[in-house]
Image (cartoon, rainbow, N blue to C red):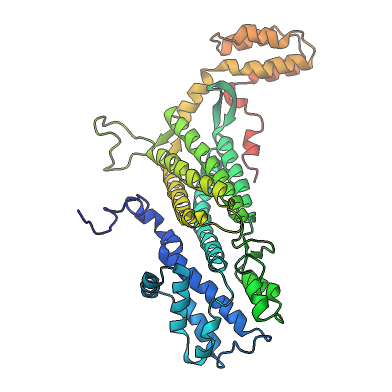
Amino acid sequence: MDLELSPLTAVSPLDGRYADKTAPLRAIFSEFGLIRRRVQVEIAWLRALCAEPALPEARCAPGDDAALQAIADGFSPADAERVKAIEATTRHDVKAVEYFIRERLPAGCAGIAEFVHFACTSEDINNMAHALQLRDGLAVLREARGGLMAALDALAAETRALPMLAHTHGQPASPTTLGKELAVFAHRLRREAAQIDAVCLPAKMSGAVGNFNAHVSAAPEVDWRALSRRVIEGFGFTQNPLTTQIESHDGMAELFDALQRWNTVLLSLDRDVWMYVSMRYLRQKAVAGEVGSSTMPHKINPIDFENSEGNLGLANAILGHLARKLPVSRLQRDLTDSTAIRNVGAGFAYTLIAIASTLRGLGRVSPDAARLAADLDANWEVLAEPIQTVMRRYGVPNAYERLKALTRGHAIDAAGIRAFVETLEVPQEAKARLLALTPAAYVGLAETLAQEP
């Protein structure tokens, strides 16, 4: 069957099942988005040439500078169709953009047609266009991150004083609070987000092998490095002064590695919340009309966290490959990066889907205080830690070993713990503190720590 493209017939779920969730990235990482940004870069370069005093040949009629910028600002899907029609003849995507701009030059600029794409190699345009895509894609992820962080912070604040039995190696461990454990993830995500935001993308506009060869041959009187830097910095990027034909993509690799680390922290949050749901420390809200299982009517499955985890794996597989692949090129240029880099949008899209899923999941869970309290009350052996630590302070010999014999592998209740404490030769004030201690009260500074930024 020859099916017309739609969300039902798309090969990838990014444009199919998840099309509504990835829609904010469509104007950025689509073919239209790439062509549009190529046009923006070409126009910026052309305007810089026209403004260069040492290039009197590159002059437009007064007032036509705004008309040049309008070519980029007003670029539409119909314009992209025209570029693709030209490419059908040229069989070169960047050259097609050049010819498109020549067609659209205002009358007063007809004499500067030869300055469109002047002295540029295709990669001068492409590396800048890709950097623009990344800049704009990061803005979408940043907005989504903000919503997720607000929800996580709210749940952590709500539960920061709610005692919870911790589990190390899957076994009962010193108590904490639910909010503090959620705050750990909020803190980690903020740290990794700062690393993402700190990446400054480098760019180049220095010709076929990065030496300004053609530039200097045509107009040696122009300070080409300075002109190139002005164009690059005008888009908010930094000039890479030493390149081959391509910008080396090291900045992209740094960015993708940082994105993977953020995604990995989110994946770890998904798994822990999934476990809290499994342990019934967190309860999921039933939504009318939803089905958890096709055969077990009672089920409310933690599908949002599972969906997020699965999509984060796909995101990191793509971003990880790009981070390892893109910085590697044979000699001054090969094209293995060209096809790979077109998949950046997929890495961003899977990340965006995952963020939305985790956010939805967080909105559907609430703590089960009774279940948390019951688990704490069933595990008085966790007080072995504070008891033996107090004993050590006051010089009671073999403190650790005595508590190990009392509690390791044995069920013990409040009465058993208190009976042991009564036998201790420690100051009365210390003994009173231990006798008053319960698993729910043994949370240290957890509530305070949960409020750390």
Could you tell whether 154 is left or right of 392 in the image?
left
Picture coordinates of residue 113, whole percent (x, y): 51, 84
Q: Nearer the viewer, residue 326 or 396?
A: 326
Q: Residue at x 59, y 87 (%)?
A: 58
Q: Residue at x 59, y 75 (%)?
A: 119
User: In the displayed image of the protein, which residue is found farthest to the right?
Assistant: 395
**Residue 422 appears in view:** no
User: In the displayed image of the protein, which residue is found farthest to the left?
Assistant: 1
Q: Residue at x 75, y 9 (%)?
A: 425
Q: Residue at x 57, y 16 (%)?
A: 380
How many numbered discs, if any?
Answer: 0
Q: Nearer the viewer, residue 333 or 289?
A: 333
Q: Answer above or below: position of 85 versus 445.
A: below
Could you tell whether 395 is left or right of 83 in the image?
right
Picture coordinates of residue 214, whole percent (x, y): 63, 74
**Residue 396 appears in view:** yes
Q: Nearer the viewer, residue 342 or 271?
A: 342
Picture coordinates of residue 194, whole percent (x, y): 63, 51
